[in-house]
Image: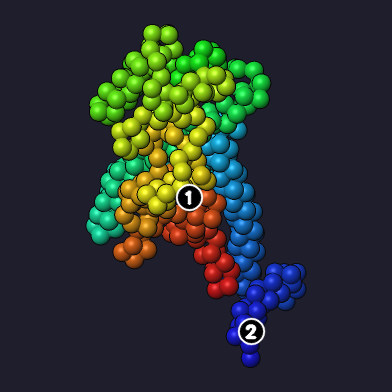
Amino acid sequence: MSLFSPLSNAVLGKLSAISGASTILGSGVSSNRLASGNNALANIQATLDQAKTNAGKQQIMASVQLRIQGIAEGIVEPKEIWEKVAGFLTLTGQPFVYSVDDQGQVEIQEQSLDTVANLPAGRRDKLRTALERLDEVRLAVDTVVTKGSLRNKLVGAVSRIGELENFAPAKEQWERDFQLTKSTGRPVLVGLDANGGLRAINQLDSNFDYVEDPEKRLVLQQAGRELQNILNGTGTATKSWQFEALGFKASGDDYFLDVNDENEVVVLHNTERRPASGARPLYQQNRNQDYHIIPSFLKPAPEDDRIFREKWEQEASALIQAKKPFHLDLVGDRIVVRETNFASVRRLDLLDTTSSTTRVAQATVNILS
């Protein structure tokens, strides 16, 4: 006999009783048997209705995932309150889950110190510690992302300079300033202002006040005065860097003054990269974008990766940077990060002992009992 024979026979027996209701009435079967058949029919119909509701819930869950993704990417405008809350939490890197009730209403549940307060002590303490650490992870991500964003701006400026040299029209103010200063034969450096915007710095007018290292600033200020005198005709070029600067001026190329590791003045192009060296292997691996105009404090550093101590912190960081919703969970004593999507929300719904899914399972048991 198959393991499934008792189950099959039980189901077939119930269905036979239902389909043969008129025979049962005609043969004088007891009212208790009839009531049992009617109850089975009602249970089956309730199960089918609940299954239909559950399928609708799953469709809504999947749609919610797509809506949140679209909001995070800026291609969907949030309208409902839950959309605004989910979008805000996603873009700010805060953990949450969502649920859908039997009426199709969406609820966003933020994961915070308050929301884990009712958990058993062991789980509560571990999740609280992780959530407190998550605040630090978010700040670290902000630092890494901000550095990357500013670095990318300068890399984009390098590409834009190449387009300007090929006679593309200037669009932004820094581009017009760059072209104007370059046309006068003066040193011009593309950098960032206090708000992270691009600017073209006329070095001879700046007094090099943007240079943080005081020793290098003094060297550049002296070099600036010397070059200013040469360009004004009141001084004579005597140093190699001065002749190099005059050569760039004569050819109409852009150039700027800098100081090397030996505190010597050097003349560079804005589009020039640092040469490959063992001292900067990480920079060289970054798609060879180690341009001289990128300040050292904006360059990727090994410390950026060491900020995140645990595996879950690295995973949370990746999701925050990718603007994807997530939440924390415990597997045994281990903190894990789960992306908040259809699969993880469906899993939580199945684990919810008060959910409609559990009631469907119980109804199925009732039919076969």
Mark 1: secondary structure:
helix
Classed neighbour count for the residue bearing mark 2: other residues with Cα under 10 Å, few (<14), some (14–19), many (≥20): few
Please, what is the three-letter code of the amino acid marked with disc 1? Answer: Gln
Classed neighbour count for the residue bearing mark 1: other residues with Cα under 10 Å, few (<14), some (14–19), many (≥20): few
Q: Give the mark nearest the N terminus, 2 or 1.
A: 2
Q: Is residue 161 left or right of residue 24?
A: left
Tell me if residue 125 can be seen: yes
Residue found at x 24% / y 57%? 121
State which quadrant residue 75 falls in.
top right
Find residue 221 and report its horizontal and vertical position in percent. Answer: 31, 19
Q: Is residue 24 above or below residue 288?
A: below
The one nearer the camera, 140 or 147, is 147
Residue 5's disc is 2
Residue 285's disc is 1
Image quarter (top left, top right, bottom left or bottom right) of the C terminus: bottom right
Find residue 163 and report its horizontal and vertical position in percent. Answer: 63, 26
